[in-house]
Every structure is written in structure tokens, then in C-alpha cells.
Image (tube, rainbow, N blue to C red):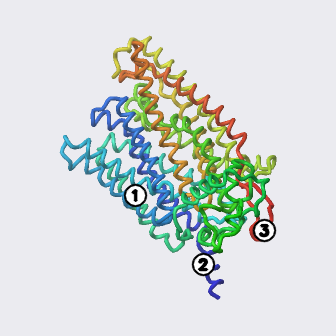
Amino acid sequence: MADSTALITRRTRGGWNAAIFIIVVEMTERFAFYGLASNLLTFLTNELGQSTATAAKQINTWIGVSCMFPILGGFLADSILGRFKTVLLSSFIYLFGMVMLPLSVTVVARRMREKAFFMALYVMAVGEGGHKPCVMTFAADQFGESNAEEKAAKTSFFNYWYLAIVLSSSIAVLALIFIQERVSWSIGFSIIAGSVGIGITIFLIGIPKYRKQAVPVGSPLTRVAQVIVAALKKWRLSSTSHHYGLCYDEDESESTNASKMVYLLARTNQFRFLDKATIIDEIDHNTSTKKRNPWRLCSVNQVEEVKLILRLIPIWISLIMFCATLAQLNTFFLKQGSMMNRTIGDHFTIPPAAFQSIVGVTILILIPLYDRVFVPMVRKITNHHSGITSLQRIGVGLFVATFNMMICGLVEAKRLRVARDHGLIDSPKEVVPMSSLWLLPQYILVGIGDVFTIVGMQELFYDQMPETMRSIGAAIFISVVGVGSFVSTGIISTVQTISKSHGEEWLVNNLNKAHLDYFYWVIASLNAVSLCFYLFIANRFVYKKLQDKANDVEGEREV
């Protein structure tokens, strides 16, 4: 009776009815983040008096730190707190940082304003550390792996999850920028703080509907370390030498979560050195206790979990330049648009940050088309449940990003020619008589690239991680965005240093004297190299393979 009641409870929890509450809290958080980040360059340069290059570096550093903290947050969630508690705690920390923002521009003395503002930003970064890696995985956990209907729904979930994020960020870009620039910054910051408070309230209302993760039983990184140590201890053994077989059984203390899985990982031929950790040698065979030493002998499933992580590392590296390209959206794209003709009619001028909404509109149009038209059509050809694989999806986005930076270089070169022809080289505050509509292609291509690469990255780093490490998997995915921001900062500094040493600095405050077009071509070249590396790695990638635990059959299938 108790078992049937638990089964009914589990069936009534989770699914879209639960995920919608989690999606709403993410929408409010993204509304707040993009409402701040999209116009941050304007605030730092106009209100705090920073130079364009300095402000760009500050923004990249803040975004980078915000995307690196999730590694710590993901670790805490998977090893100690669980995803639900981590989302809740981090959301309150994030709200505290948001409340500090309007106070920093109103209550705090002007000489302390910059320090107070950046303190608020980095308190928010700490909150992001727990929120980002857990909220998406917690929402995806509402769809089971064993139920075919829920598994199919999970594929659509990743598309609509990103669609919701883009919808909220587009609203923020369109609405908040006008309030910040035309009304006041303090009111704009107060609105985004209020949105986070509303999101937390809605998240709490949905508690009875959530399908919660099993209580963490310890650090999943310990399991990784055990495999490496055990393999090193048996480095002299070979698979053909005399031994007592391989260890397939999970130790009870290590399988509290794993026992709930319907499938176990099947053996693969990559990283075969680690397979030595599964070999039962004479010491393991003659041990006096029934419980195996996890630092000498690991199960096949545990070893395959480590292989999953190792396979994702080169993919992660190959995505850094894509994320460095995205960093230009909040920095040089913004400055470029501010120097072009943005007027509509006689009285209305479009704020330069508002052009970021074009990215959002592109994504809002393409994701439903991708999910409802492209996937069913391609599925008939490929017989893959997602139409194309996650790696193929990412690869398309990387090509688009490379092509986009070439377009950016050509458009900026044209803008410089127009400025030169009209004698505006030494007039940085004058608007160049060139329509800002020339920027539409680069913003649209950013949206197309995101539809393929960002959603593909989310799906890959969720599906291909061990189940007990999915928060860390999300953190690893997010961290590449942070590293990309740091790399963008490094590229800016390197370009400034080298170009200055040759007598003509490329990135100066007066863009009419700068060579932003050369900078874009540098990014395009690095993207092309990164794309080639990605194709090399992706062509050799082995997807997660599962075996049916119930029937103990090595019936392998890709996920």
C-alpha cells in the first residue's frame, strides 16, 4: 500500500506542471540579469566615467566570475545540499545583491558609489554560482528517464527553456533600457530587484509539485578520484593477464542514487587505461571483508562515469572562442551602434542596447520552427529523436559564429569609410551618417548561432554527464561562458599592447580612429581555428551508451 502511494505521488509530481514554476523563476532571474548586463557599458562609461576599453574589461571580468562560481555551486548541490536547497539559498543571495544595486546609486555617497556598485555585482555573482548550475538541472529532473513520453518531453524542454530565457531577456532589453536612460537608473535597478523577489515567491508556491532529487551521499568527485587512484595502483596489470574477472557490481554505499537508475553504463573502448580499476586481482580476491576497497577496485559503471567527463573536456575547450565571441554583444557591438544613425522620424532615437532585442526576436522565431518543423522533418531522415545530434547542432552554431565575425569586420570597415568620407575622424561625439540597420545581420546571426550552439551545449552537458553529477555538468557548461569572457578580456589586452607597440592602437575610445574591424577579423580567425579543432574532436566523440540493468544485458544504445 505504501509503495503504491509513493508511486502515485511520484506520478503526480514532476512533468510540465512542476517545470513551469522553475521556468518562471529562471525567467525573472534572466530578466534581472540582462536588464542589468545589456546596458552596463553605458552606465560604467556615462555614470561612472570609465573608458570604453576599461568598461569592457570590467564587464567581461564580472560575467566571467559569475560563470565560474557555478562550479562551486554545482559541487555543493551534488555532494551536500541537493539542487532544490541550492536553488533556494542562492536565489536569496542573488536577491540581496539586486537590492544593493539601487541603494548604491541613491543612498551611498558619490565617492563610494563605484565600490558599492561593484560589491553589489559580485554578491550577485555569488548568487549566480548556486542558481545557474542547479535551476536548469532541477527543471530537467522533472522529466524522467525511464518513461518514454517524459523522455521525449525532455528534448523539447531544452528548446523551450532557452526560449523562456530569451523571451524574458528581450523584454528586459526593450523595456528596462528606456527606463534606465530616460527615467532613472535607480528605478530601473529597483524593477529588476522586484522581479527576482516575485520569482522566488512563485518558486516557493510550486514546492508541492516538485520531483526532488535523492539526498546526496557525498562528493561525486570522490568517485572520480577513486577510479584514477585504483587505475594507477594496477598500472602493471593488463586485460589479458591472469586475474579474477572484472567488477560489475556497485557497492551499496556508493549506489544509493545509482540504484534508482533503470540503466547502467555499458563498457566503451576509450581511455582503456582506466579499465584497470575494474580488474579484480589477487589482493581484491583474497580480501577478508565482503566490502571492496573503493580505492583499489571500482565498478565498470563508476569507471564509465569518469570516461564521460573526460570526453567532454576537449569539447569544452573547443567552445571557448564561441563564448568569447558572445562577449562582444554587451561591449563593442553596443559602442559600434552608439556611433551610428539610430533615429526613427524626427524625435525618437533607439538606445544602442535595444538592438540586442533583435537577438531575442530571432531566437523566439527560430526555436518553435526548429522544434515543430525542423526536428520532425529531419527525424524522418536520420531516425534520431532530436533530428540531429547535440554535437551536430553545436557545430552548425560554431560555423555561424565564425561567419558572423567576418560580417562584423566588413560592416565596421564600411562605417569607418563613411566616417572618413564625412570628415568625422576627430569627432567621436558626432553620429556617423550610416543607418544602424547595417548592424541587423550581425545581431540576427548571433541569434541563429545561439539557437544551435547554446541549446546544444545545454543538452550535451546534461545528457552526457553521470546522473549524480548533472549540477556540476551544468556548471561546466556555464563555466565555458565565463572562460570565454576572460579570454575576450585577454584578447583585448593583447591587441591593445601589440597594436600600440606598432604605433597605432586599434581599440581607443574614439572608434572613428580605432580599428575595431581588425579586432573582429582577429576574433573570426581564432573562431575558424577553434571550429577546426571542434570538428576533429566531435568526429571522435563517443556518446553515452547504456545497458539494461534489469535484464543484465549489454544491449547498448546511445543517449
Nearer to us: label 2 or label 1: 2
Judged from the image, the secondary structure of the residue bearing numbered disc 3 is loop
The reply to whether the C-beta atoms of the residues labelled 1 and 3 are less than 8 Å apart is no
What percent of the width, then of the height, locates residue 314? 61, 41
- Estimate the x, y position of residue 391 in percent, counting from the top left: 68, 44
* Kind of residue at disc 2: Thr
Image location of residue 355, percent across then percent down = 47, 36
The numbered mark, 2 or 3, whose residue comes first in the sequence reads: 2
Q: Nearer the viewer, residue 32 or 143?
A: 143
Spatial CA distance of label 2 from label 3 is 29 Å
**Could you say which disc has been placed on residue 552 in the image?**
3
Residue drawn at the location 44% of the way across and 11% of the way down: 421
- Could you classify mark 2 by the number of other residues whose Cα lies within 10 Å: few (under 14), some (14-19), or many (20 or more)? few
Q: What residue sits right under mark 2 in the picture? A: 9
Between 29 and 503, which is closer to the camera in this rendering? 503
At a point 69% along the width and 35% down the height, the residue shown is 536
Q: Amino acid at mark 3?
A: Asp
Q: Residue at 35% across / 48% down in the picture?
A: 122
List the residue tagged with mark 1: 196
**Residue 58: image x %, image y %?**
37, 37
For the residue marked with disc 1, what is the amino acid?
Val
Residue 293's label in the rendered image is none
Asked if one can make out residue 513 in the rendered structure from this viewpoint, the answer is no
How much space separates mark 2 and mark 1, taking CA atoms? 30 Å
Q: Determine if residue 413 is in view.
A: yes
